[in-house]
Amino acid sequence: MKKTKRILMTVTLLIAAVFLLNAANLPAANVQAASKGTYRAILQAYKRNDYRKVQRLSKTLPKNANEKCARKLKSKYRKAAKKITGKMRKWRGMENYIPGIQWYAFSDINKNGKPELIVKYGGVETDCSIWVYEYKGGKYKKAKGAIYDTWHPTLYNYTSGNGLVLQERPISEYDCEIVTLVTLSKGRIKGKTVRERYLSSRKQRTTMPCKIKTYTP
């Protein structure tokens, strides 16, 4: 009888150990649950050209940001954003190269609990800009500064603090890759390039975690 109990206890402990090991390797359920130091370590590894570590750490974070403040966007933010995007000319593709709003997104860049409005505006990829609007006094106000001349930009939530990660692929979809950390402080956005690298094939592309969803007006 005692031998049977010992066997059952051993099996139970082994099952629990396997469960905990698997849980440790699973990605965080959302950006709020993500480890605060992980994205910082990802960008440090990217800067050092350690792309294997970048991919390994990226797997511990969710693929999409799915921020609570953006996923369950309050009507006051939605209405305030509409007053900004609704007044902008809509982009009509490459026709006549007329600039317009190509997409917009929401993300809490400075981590104050309020989603910022992010707008991509331009005519062609060589002259597109990223603008950021802060919610203050019941409306969205444009922050000073901008990210200019972005090429095929993709936005990611920076879970390690103030900022968002901007990934660009100039020249073509896979010839070059630029990663920039964009921060928002005191009503101004600033971009700091982490690394710019050239690729010889599409297989060398790096995909960052916590992608921010964009919307077409």
Image (tube, grey):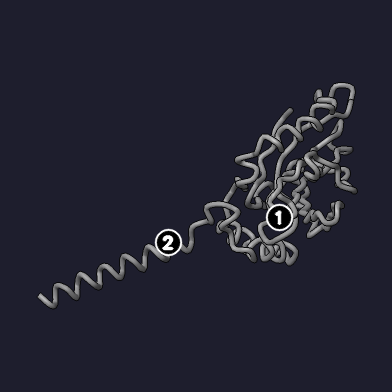
Horizontal and vertical percent for residue 199?
A: 74, 52
Q: Residue at x 65, y 38 (%)?
A: 74
Quickly name the residue at label 1: 111
Horizontal and vertical percent for residue 102?
A: 78, 32
Query: Toward which corner of the image does residue 43 lie, by quadrant?
Result: bottom right
Left or right of 15, for residue 214: right
Which callout, 2 or 1, points to the residue nearer the camera? 1
Q: Residue at x 80, y 30 (%)?
A: 83
Q: Earlier in the sequence, mark 2 or mark 1?
A: 2
Left or right of 43, for residue 6: left
Residue 2 in sight: yes
Mark 1: give few (<14), some (14-19) or many (20+) Cα within 10 Å.
some
Q: Is residue 63 above or below residue 98?
A: below
Q: Report the amino acid beneath label 1.
A: Lys
| Outermost residue to the bottom | 2
Q: Report the amino acid beneath label 2.
A: Asn
* Secondary element at image label 2: helix
Tell me the quarter of the image containing the N terminus: bottom left
What number is the disc on residue 22?
Answer: 2
* In contact (CB < 8 Å): disc 2 and disc 1: no
Seen from the viewer's position, the closer of residues 119 and 181 is 119
Query: Toward which corner of the image does residue 79 lie, by quadrant?
Result: top right
